[in-house]
Amino acid sequence: MPDAPRQMRLWQLRRHWDALAREDPFFAVLTDPDKQGNKWALAEFFSTGVAEVEGDLARLRVLAPGFSGRAALDFGCGAGRLTQALGAHFKKVTGVDISGHMVDLARGHNAREGVDFIHNPGPDLRLFPDNSFSLVYSRITLQHIAPGYTKRYLAEFVRVLAPGGILSVQIPEFVPAVVPDRLKFSTWPPTMIMRIRRNLRFHFPGWFPGTPTMQMYAIPGGEVRDCLVKAGAELLPSELIGHGEVRNDTYLARKARSA
């Protein structure tokens, strides 16, 4: 059995996503094979965010009747695809991302008033006070963050929610096992040299030729729900979405109202 993939620290994750943002940022967000190589048209890319947000908010209103709010947080905003779309429904929307290059790109393409982007490379959301947002929203982001960090972020999501606010986040319950790059065999260059290069690229992306490999992590649903309940959230029915071999859960929760 191969070793389990080494879990990335946040500084490594930041380097990876800065490198991805420099090379092919829209494909890094939406990995459609037909769009690799900077083939995403700007209008088409952002229109996918509009459709996704509309669908998610429609389902949210069914599961949480009467929900309304003025401020939303998009965690892992990338180039702002979903952040701008949320701007049509909330007076103020803040997108945060670990990659400064992604945040710069999002600011450059922002077309909405009331939408702001913040670089947040830390393991928490200390930039925001308690009870700041009506909605905390995250899609196809936490799957790239090691579980220990994700669990800490989940508690932070609940903290920054206003009482009665809604959390809607996507986290895989299962991702297929892969052989770590550092163990893969190659005939040329010699295997040992290739493994050294892969390890260096893992730790120092952008310093060596080649695109960094996106890391994928899963967390059992029970652990996610326990984190949210311990943080003070009331669980709402979740939704399981399959994407290839990845089983993605969209978790919905409401922060308890003040007594």
Image: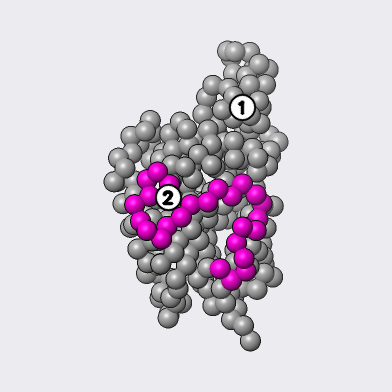
Residue 119 spot, x, y in % from top left: 55, 48
The range drawn in magenta is 107-132
* Tag 1: amino acid: Arg
Q: Residue at x 68, y 42 (%)?
A: 9
Q: Residue at x 48, y 36 (%)?
A: 21
Residue 205 spot, x, y in % from top left: 59, 30
User: Which of the numbered marks, if any, corresponds to residue 25?
Assistant: none
Q: Is residue 114 magenta?
A: yes
User: Which of the numbered marks, if any, corresponds to residue 80?
Assistant: 2
Q: Main secondary structure of the magenta part?
A: loop
Looking at the picture, tell me which residue is in the foreground, 61 or 41: 41
Circle nearer the viewer, 1 or 2: 2
The image's colouring method is one colour
Above or below, 29 against 126 in this view is: above
Q: Is residue 169 visible?
A: yes
Looking at the picture, tell me which residue is in the foreground, 256 or 175: 256
Q: Is residue 204 magenta?
A: no
